[in-house]
Image (tube, rainbow, N blue to C red):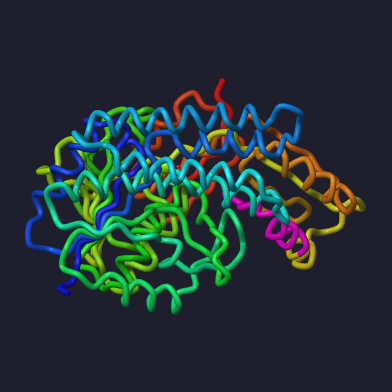
Amino acid sequence: MRSPLIFKFGGASVKDAESVKNVAKIINQYNKRPIVVVVSAIGKTTNAFEEVLGAYTANKKGNEKQINKLLAQIQELHLGIINNLFDQPEEITRQVNEFIESARNSTRQQYVNYSEAYDAIVHHGELISTRIIAAYVGSFKETVWHDTRKLIKTDDHFRRATVKWEDTAQAIQSTIVQDCVHVVQGFIGSTANEKPTTLGREGSDYTGAVFAYCLNASSLTIWKDVPGMLNGDPKIFSNTTKIDNIPFNEAIELAFYGASIIHPKTIQPLKKKNIPLQIKSFIHPSKSGTTIGGMEHPVPKVANFILKKNQILLQISTKDLAFIAEHHLSAVYQLFAQKGIVVNLMRNTATKAMFCINNDTIIVPKVMTELGKTFEVEWTDALELLTIRNYDATDEARETQGLKILLEQRTMETVQFVFKRS
Ligand code: ASP
Ligand code: MG
């Protein structure tokens, strides 16, 4: 098989029958190439399955009725799309109904914990969507549907499973061999003993990167409803510019600071094999989009703006006002790592240390209680964190005008402000 192209289509790109037709049209333009098409669940189906899970875990009287009602809604959405796509919908309807029954069956089992139940129930969204896409594309192009649970092998950290690269590469390389279209599910995998797992919300981009890596693909293209990667979220910043080219490392940095265009884990495997990542518009597929790759510099060279909302600034000091020493910081970071807290910005002085973190309403109070055993803890919430990369004085002045800045940190490339909006 020649080196394939990998395409990833998210939920928004397959949200209705018209969208599915558009996806098929895009695939059809790439003739005579093997293409692996990674697809997410249709529209908001993952959220809908999370509701099914909610009904399952509520464990109340009448929850079976609620589960059936929610599953009927999911089924109706998909059968509606099918009826608009196929003249003879019998076979594909049967396949989709089979997965609906499999989902129902998964709500009748017992699981060790919430996360295992989550993956067992929620992963059905991708199975259903890919069946529909494969059947539709297959009506005019040679197409094979694969079960990603047999291809992406993971550990058993349910809801955030880690890929086992060797097993995965072997399974993918021995299965994806034909010169045709291969349709696979994003987001999902399975453990060594075949329990379904998921890679974390919005994880299908990463699935695309895993297939690209294992198949030494020519490129990975993520098809989105935006023209490419912009230098800021247009809903927040005015006068944004599309970035044409951007080096892998720079894209990783932007993802780290919170740019949400791609799942942060996606770039690493691509970088290892120098496989370019294209971000293109499924609305204007002939336009060039953004290429993330092995080039030296971004083009155009512009500042990047990233805003993280809902931040909290924790400030700790020792109870006897002794200096904050390395062992204190080490203990704090260990606690953060254990609770899954990511530090967005940190600063320490002789007697104080400050940490800007996402204000997760479940974890943060627990962490504060824990810290309170050793330290005096103060905090300020309802904050935002603005990062400007490759900044100049004009950018900085414009974006910080009128903000009440609590903390500021700067390197040659990056300036960050923790602030309160007045
Ligand atoms: N369907 C999953 C989600 O919505 C995975 C994805 O879209 O990438 O999180
Ligand atoms: Mg999705």
Q: Quadrant of the N terminus?
A: bottom left
Nearest the viewer among 40 and 200 is 40
Is residue 221 magenta-colored? no
Residue 381 picture location, percent across and down: 67, 32
Relative to 336, say whether 289 is above or below: above
Q: Is residue 57 left or right of residue 120?
A: right
Nearest the viewer among 324 and 280 is 280
User: To which quarter of the image does residue 152 belong?
Assistant: bottom left
Residue at x 66% of width, y 54% of height: 340
The residue furthest right is 320
Relative to 183, say whether 156 is above or below: below
Residue at x 20% of width, y 40% of height: 282
Q: Is residue 255 left or right of residue 349?
A: left
Q: Can residue 283 be seen by looking at this rendering?
A: yes
Q: Can residue 246 be seen by looking at this rendering?
A: no
The residue furthest top is 422
How many numbered badges does the structure rendering display?
A: 0
Residue 382 picture location, percent across and down: 63, 29
Q: Is residue 167 left or right of residue 182?
A: right
Residue at x 54% of width, y 66% of height: 194
Is residue 336 magenta-colored? yes
- Magenta region: 331-347
Nearest the viewer among 102 and 243 is 102
Q: Quadrant of ligand 1?
A: top left
Residue 206 picture location, percent across and down: 40, 58
Q: Quadrant of the C terminus?
A: top right
Residue 346 picture location, percent across and down: 62, 52
Residue at x 14% of width, y 37% of height: 284
User: To which quarter of the image does residue 61 belong?
Assistant: top right
